[in-house]
Structure formats: C-alpha cells, structure tokens
Image (cartoon, rainbow, N blue to C red):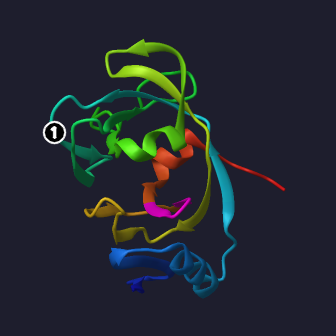
Amino acid sequence: MFKLHTLPGDANGQRLIASDAMTPESFDELAKMLNIPIVQARKIGFVAAQQSQKEQFVETLWNGKESQITAQIGDWVVTNLTPNLSVLRDKDGNANIYAIRADKFSSFYKRHEGANSFGDIYRAISQVDCLYLSGGFEIMAPWGEVQLADQGYLLRNGSDIYGNHKDTFDATYEKMVG
C-alpha cells in the first residue's frame, strides 16, 4: 500500500509514502496514477564491492541518511563509482555505500578489471525500470528498512522496488531511448 502526498507550495511535486515494500504491480499502478511513462535505464557507473566477512551495519548516505541495512556474512558491501572509476561522494565527502544480499549480487553485477580500497571493480549487467519522483520518497525498501530522498527515482529491478536519490541516479545511470 502506498500514498502520494502533495508538497505544500508545489502542485506538481508529490512525495511517495509506502510503509510496506512495493510490488511490481504497485510500481505500474503508481505510474498510471502519476500519468508518467516508465523509462528503462542502465547503470553506466561501476561499483567496488567486497563480501562481508562479518555481520556489519551499513548506512547509505547522500547529503544525509538515505537508508541502512545490516549486512550478513556473505552479503556484498558496495560502493558506487562514476564511469571513470572515481568514488561517488556527496557534498559532505561521504562515499555512496550500500549492501546487497548475497543471493542478489550476481544477477546485478559482473566482475570487471581492477580494484580499489573498497573492493574489486564490477559493472552492472541489468536494466531497470524507473519513475522520476520530484517530491522524493519515504518507502520501505525490499531489505526491510526505510529509504528516504527529497527527490529521486523509484527503480524496479526484477521484483525488487527501491529508491535512488536523483543525484546518484544521474551520476551512475543512463536512460535508454527508444
């Protein structure tokens, strides 16, 4: 279940609120409600990743807290990189780090050459469907934690629906035309 909240002073800006993880069907329903097209995108940035050797808390920051997860042994701790392999950092200098469950990682990424202090370099192999939300979102991510952004994209990657801040999306994804 989700709802849209119109932002004060911005008739076009609607914030997505979802207290439960969204489904592929609710993603389609949202696109119809907003009367916006679903756009396909592919990741053009790379990631550095390493498997967690212990249970560890991972906080995703982008100009404030975006989300958090406790990575289990075997989960992947991932750092977003730009297309030229630089670490993607927010205005405060925080690296854009997140975690992906062990059973999902290989369907999203394939080994690339090289490594840095955050791990081996990987490139994305999947495409996502996306919806731009000018008012941002406050949603329950598939990993069971709240995800926040003041503006961004709702992404559908297989059956997983999650958010991505506009700045990180713009730096690491390319919308596909046609």
Q: Residue at x 52, y 36 (%)?
A: 109
On whether residue 23 falls in the magenta region, the answer is no
Question: Mark 1: which secondary structure?
Answer: strand
Please name the residue shown 63% across and 84% down the image: 32
Q: Residue furthest right?
A: 178
- Front residue of 132/162: it is 162
- Compared to residue 177, the image places residue 20 above or below, namely below
Instruction: Write down the quadrant of residue 91 in the picture.
Output: top left
**Position of residue 27 measured from the top left corner of the image (x, y, whole percent):** 54, 75
- Residue 54, position as x, y percentages in the image: 15, 33
Q: Which x, y percent locates residue 164?
A: 45, 55
Q: Compared to 170, does 93 lie above or below?
A: above
Q: What kind of secondary structure does the magenta stretch mostly adopt?
A: strand
In the displayed structure image, the side of residue 47 where residue 73 appears, left or right: left
Dot 1 corresponds to which residue? Answer: 56
| Residue at screen point 52% across, 60% down | 155
Seen in the image, is 176 located left or right of residue 66?
right
Three-letter amino acid code at the position of disc 1:
Gln
Badge 1: how crowded within 10 Å, few (<14), some, or many (20+)? some
Q: Residue at x 43, y 54 (%)?
A: 165
In magenta stretch: residue 161: yes
Side (left or right) of 63 relative to 15: left
Q: Can you tell which quarter of the image residue 178 is in?
A: bottom right
Q: Nearer the viewer, residue 125 or 17?
A: 125
Magenta residues span 156-162
